[in-house]
């Protein structure tokens, strides 16, 4: 995990600011949407919405939106399973199940370093469990990407493995917070490809890190996507590549900026309208006034 100089102390900075002024009461509007797409025969995506039971299993077409107070802690995640047949479904479901057990440990961390270590411990445990469940299902290999958002004391901190992405729309500017764990993006570091070339390279689908990547889980490490104070108007998007493969950055920005009642559903519909060649799942966290 890489650090962020602006967030050396994850929690105390926010608390110091809150002592100086009365913070505006804010709420979180959470929208979640998933769809099988037009080509796939099963939905291998999954999500975690702070432990809430939003649906009985993952359906081919599901969407919901709700609001909640910004409480002490919350955890959200989106997973994109892979492995063929039912192995992708098994892997993403396993990742979500293990996350439920690690939720309190992750948000109970005293600082950013400890939280990152706990996320890595979760990633290793999830990888082991995924490998077990895939083997039980008769598969040879399976795994899942992960985007993870942890909220504590009005600070949101995010992590990821694989090529599922996290975006932040703030003050009209859309920023991608993740960097794909793929062979194509490694080739950017070697100056073999530009970022624009990597976005269309066949190697953009070859993952270099994900949950369940290897039976030896010691090398499983989460990427760090940043840590921010929740601010009114912020919109954080967590999505599988079924969205960004179908929609341009400008299209994603346009839908996020429109602030529809169910923003996640609007994003999924955009992906479907553009071809829907893969499962697509979006989870949007919007910070709104009380």
Image: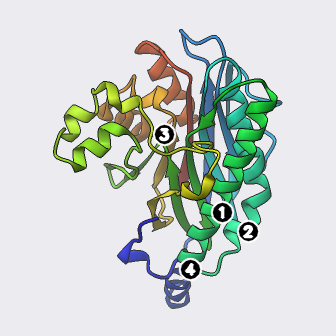
Q: Tag 2 or tag 4, which sits nearer the N-term?
A: 4
Q: Is residue 169 above or below residue 155?
A: above
Please identify, in this view, whether the residue under mark 4 or under mark 1 is nearer the observer: 1
In the rendered view, does 196 fall on the left or right side of 9?
Answer: left
Q: Tag 1 or tag 3, which sits nearer the N-term?
A: 1
Residue 14 tag number: none
Label 3 belongs to which residue? 164
In the rendered view, does 3 fall on the left or right side of 106?
Answer: left
Label 4 belongs to which residue? 11
Residue 105 tag number: 2
Q: Tag 1 or tag 2, which sits nearer the N-term?
A: 2
Residue 153 is situated, as x and y percent measured from the top left of the image, at 62, 74
Q: Tag 1 or tag 4, which sits nearer the N-term?
A: 4
Residue 95 occupies which quadrant of the picture? top right
Label 1 belongs to which residue? 121
Neighbours of disc 3 within 10 Å: few (<14), some (14-19), many (20+)? many
Q: CA distance from mark 2 to mark 3?
A: 23 Å
Q: Tag 3 or tag 4, which sits nearer the N-term?
A: 4
Residue 159 is situated, as x and y percent measured from the top left of the image, at 52, 56
Secondary structure, mark 1, is helix
Q: Is residue 46 above or below residue 23?
A: above
C-beta proximity under 8 Å, tags 2 and 1: yes
Q: Tag 3 or tag 2, which sits nearer the N-term?
A: 2
Q: In this view, which residue lies farthest toward the front?
A: 216
Q: Nearer the viewer, residue 100 or 184?
A: 184
Please identify, in this view, whether the residue under mark 2 or under mark 1 is nearer the observer: 1
Neighbours of disc 2 within 10 Å: few (<14), some (14-19), many (20+)? some
Q: Residue at x 73, y 60 (%)?
A: 103
Q: CA distance from mark 3 to mark 1?
A: 20 Å
Secondary structure, mark 4, is loop
């Amino acid at each position: 995990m890489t650090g962020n100089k602006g967030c050396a102390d994850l929690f105390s900075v926010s608390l110091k600011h809150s002592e100086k002024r009365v913070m505006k009461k804010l709420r979180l509007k959470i929208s979640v949407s998933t769809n099988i797409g037009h080509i796939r025969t099963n939905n291998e995506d999954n999500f975690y919405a702070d432990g809430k039971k939003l649906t009985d299993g993952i359906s081919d077409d599901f969407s919901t939106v709700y609001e909640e107070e910004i409480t002490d802690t919350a955890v959200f995640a989106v997973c994109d399973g892979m492995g063929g047949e039912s192995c992708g479904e098994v892997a993403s479901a396993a990742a979500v199940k293990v996350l439920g057990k690690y939720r309190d440990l992750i948000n109970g961390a005293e600082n950013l370093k400890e939280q990152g270590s706990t996320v890595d411990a979760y990633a290793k445990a999830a990888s082991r469990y995924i490998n077990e469940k895939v083997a039980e299902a008769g598969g040879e290999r399976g795994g899942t990407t992960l985007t993870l958002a942890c909220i504590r004391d009005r600070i949101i901190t995010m992590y990821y493995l694989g090529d599922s992405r996290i975006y932040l729309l703030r003050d009209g500017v859309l920023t991608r917070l993740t960097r794909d764990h793929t062979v194509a993006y490694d080739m950017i570091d070697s100056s073999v490809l530009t970022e624009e070339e990597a976005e269309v390279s066949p190697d953009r689908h070859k993952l270099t890190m994900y949950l369940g990547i290897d039976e030896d889980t010691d090398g499983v490490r989460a990427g760090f996507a940043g840590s921010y104070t929740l601010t009114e108007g912020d919109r954080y998007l967590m999505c599988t590549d079924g969205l960004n493969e179908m929609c341009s950055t400008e299209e994603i920005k346009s839908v996020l900026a429109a602030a529809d009642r169910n923003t996640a559903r609007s994003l999924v519909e955009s992906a479907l309208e553009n071809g829907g060649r893969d499962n697509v799942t979006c989870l949007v966290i919007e910070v709104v006034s009380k």
